[in-house]
Image (cartoon, rainbow, N blue to C red):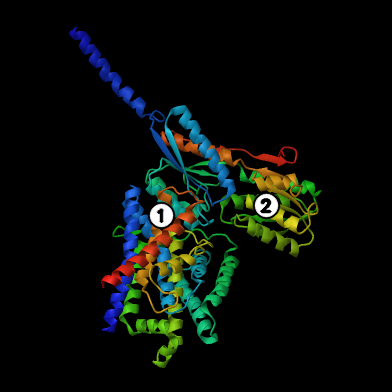
Amino acid sequence: MNKLTIALVAAAAVALPGIASAADQPGMMKKDSYRFVIIPKVVHPWFDLVNDGAMEAGAVIEAQTGSKVEIVYSAPQQADVVQQNQIIESSIATRPDGIAIDLLDASGNRASLEDALGQGIPVTVFDSVPPPGMPLTSIGNDFCEQAEIASERLVELLGGEGEVAIMMGVPTAPNHAIRAECHEKVFAKYDGIKLVATGIDNDSIETAQKQAAAIMQANPGLKGWVACDAAGPIGIGQAIQEAGKVGEVLMVGLDNLPEMLQLIRDGVADSSSSTKPQMQGYWSVMAMWQQATGIETPKYIDTGIAILTKDNVGE
Amino acid sequence: MQRKNRLGFLKNQMMGVLIALTVIFVISAIVSPYFLTSYNMTVVARSLAFVGLITIGQSMLMILGELDLSLGVMAGLCGVVSGILMVNFGLNPWLAMFLSLCLGAALGFFNGIMVTTLGLHSLVLTIGTAGIFGGANLVLTKGVAITNIPKEVQFLGRGDFLGMPVPFVIMIVVLAIASWVILKTPFGRYIYAIGDNTQAARMLGIKVDRVRALVFTAAGTLAALAGLLMVTRLGTAQPSIGETWVLPPIAASVIGGVATTGGIGTPFGAILGASIIAVIENIIVLFGVSPYWQGVVSGFIVVLAISFDSISRRYLRGNG
């Protein structure tokens, strides 16, 4: 009996640390509640769709695990990196389980992101490129491919000839800058295509409309438009309609905001090379949740690109 | 005797703002456990520092009876110029920052000279010059940030001194100097006299135009300082710096008891007003207020704060 007791105690002594260390292993710890912060570039309908996806992911985690998930959506009122950094820093003070952010400017956001990581708060980046050298999970699509699809389609519609223009979003936003550069590269491949102007809309529909109207005035021979952000094509579409140039000036848009879809239905835009904002929000929360349980997440999660035309955009 | 009365009035005036700020602090601390953490206090202090510097300049102009709507974009332009000088021209960062401060002083002086020599209304003039400075910013940068600001100057924006953010310490030093100038020197008395009654000040022999030009120059220099500190904070010279620094310094000054008609208020009161705005911006995020409701909530709290300030001032006067 004594020998049996000793044997059991010895077995327990060997097994218990093993059990304890298994609980400490990545993904094995469970919290009763999680709070994740989503910080977009600016208050904007595209980011509302991101938030929808984030809420959906929160509901899925709750249903599957029983842990309560709170999604805090905190958006700058203007696309201003100073304002966005203030939101990051104020959010850090609330000790969330993760922050997902669409960076306005990777370099300008760097100090605040370092603050978050320094405080032990995992950071995930969506729809943008992380600052060089920062090991952050990035969720989005291939921005260059998205732009190339749009500009190649416009070139095809124009039969490889004509004057074209690009509407940039926020020039300092890496994803917008990458798209603009890739549009330019595509246009440069074709001798018959001449890039005559580049507007800057700062992710504002109103600014995009004004810029597009002025560019069309200054370039009466303009035949086609592409854009680098979600607000751009909506403003361009309004300018094309106001100038009475529907069918004369073509546009291949970007993303899937309701106004963009309507422009396709109305024949103002031919099509749109669209990101999937809901999916970006969904996987941002999933990545933050995994990180909060200690699991290492991939460097990049590609949410893909959808080509929206009159045939698949619906009524 | 008159001086004592004025200081007494100022104390009463600031007491209302101080009470309003304290009430907001206490409520925030009760509602959010994160509010009074040292990290969060650092966040609030740092965000206050940049707008605070502009607020000090703007409040001095308002006491003088003037307004400069170009201070925000001036900050952005000076920040961008310092970045260009440091990065593109490889100039010594300290020299580049000094030259940008001089640029801020020159731009402020330009506004002051235009107001004094041509008799232009400062509000209208500075709407125009804001367009010029903002346009120059875009011409220089094409909207693209200047990166790789030398690390040796980044401590000015990112570092701490005695547990406080360096920009906040700089703002406190500037506030102390501005308060001393405005309350303790003849130059400060001239500012109040001009703001109170320009014609009477002229009759008293005060060189009104010179004082005006000097205050515009000082405000321009402070705007440049704010822009430079933000560049060192971000590590990049963003063309958008200062775009959101136009109305908050004016609102802060008014909340802090500076009269829009001139002659009344202090930079210290204006900084108390700026503190209320900084705390509101912070608690909106801490409380998780929806972005679509933020304008409504922050506006409501400002209205509440100035109403509280007005009521408490009446009460204090009644008991004085």
Residue at the farthest left position: A2
Q: Which residue corresponds to the image point at 57% horizontal and 64% vertical from the top-left? A: B141
Q: Amino acid at mark 1?
A: Asn
Disc 1 target residue: B282
Q: Which residue corresponds to the image point at 57% horizontal and 74% vertical from the top-left? A: B128
- B251 or B51, nearer to the observer: B251
Q: Amino acid at mark 2?
A: Ile
User: Please, what secondary structure does the residue beneath circle 2 have?
Assistant: helix
Q: In which chain is the residue bearing label 1?
A: B
Disc 2 target residue: A234
Circle 1 residues within 10 Å: few <14, some 14–19, many ≥20: many
Q: In which chain is the residue bearing label 2?
A: A
- Give the side of residue A6 with respect to residue B209, left or right: left
The percent coordinates of residue B178 (x first, y second) are 35, 75
The circle drawn on residue A20 is none
Q: Quadrant of the N terminus of chain A?
A: top left
- B29 or B53, nearer to the observer: B29
Q: Is residue A313 above or below residue B50?
A: above
Q: Is residue A290 above or below residue B11?
A: above
Q: Which residue corresponds to the image point at 50% horizontal and 31% vertical from the top-left? A: A60
